[in-house]
Amino acid sequence: MSDQPSDQPSEQLSYEQAREELVETVRRLENGGTTLEESLALWERGEHLAGVCQQWLDGVRERLDATLAEDDESTGG
């Protein structure tokens, strides 16, 4: 992966893409060697990517809950 953030809008990132970029962002922050301004930009991007990942996970949880509820209704549970 390149050292630059993805050019793809966050709304279009898959969970896997957002997670991969988040991992890379954290790695860059942990390695240091960036200016304060760069570190702040990386932190902000990481926070945003974490939110994108959370939205994906929340959506999956809602779908699972809906499927389980449907299963319970169809089995009389």
Image: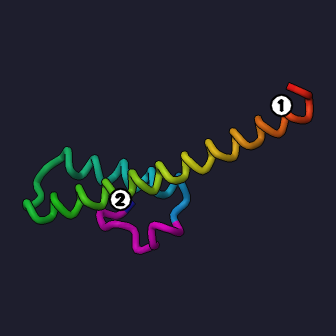
Of residue 74 and residue 60, the one placed in the foreground of this image is 74
Q: Farthest left residue?
A: 36
Check disc 1 and give the amino acid type: Asp
Give the distance between the C-alpha atoms of the residues marked 1 and 2, in whole angstroms: 36 Å
Where residue 16 sits: x, y (%)?
53, 52
**Tag 2: amino acid:** His
Q: Quadrant of the N terminus?
A: bottom left
x and y, in percent, of residue 28 in the image: 24, 52
Residue at the image position 54 percent from the left and 46 percent from the top: 57
Q: Where's residue 24, x and y in %? A: 34, 52
**Tag count:** 2
Return the residue at label 2: 48
Asked whether 52 falls inside the magenta stretch, the response is: no
Residue 11 appears left or right of 43 = right
Q: Which residues are magenta?
A: 2-12
Kindly check if marks 1 and 2 are in contact, taking CB atoms under 8 A apart as contact.
no
Residue at figure coordinates x 41%, y 54% from the top left = 51
- SS for tag 2? helix
Q: Which residue is mark 1?
A: 72
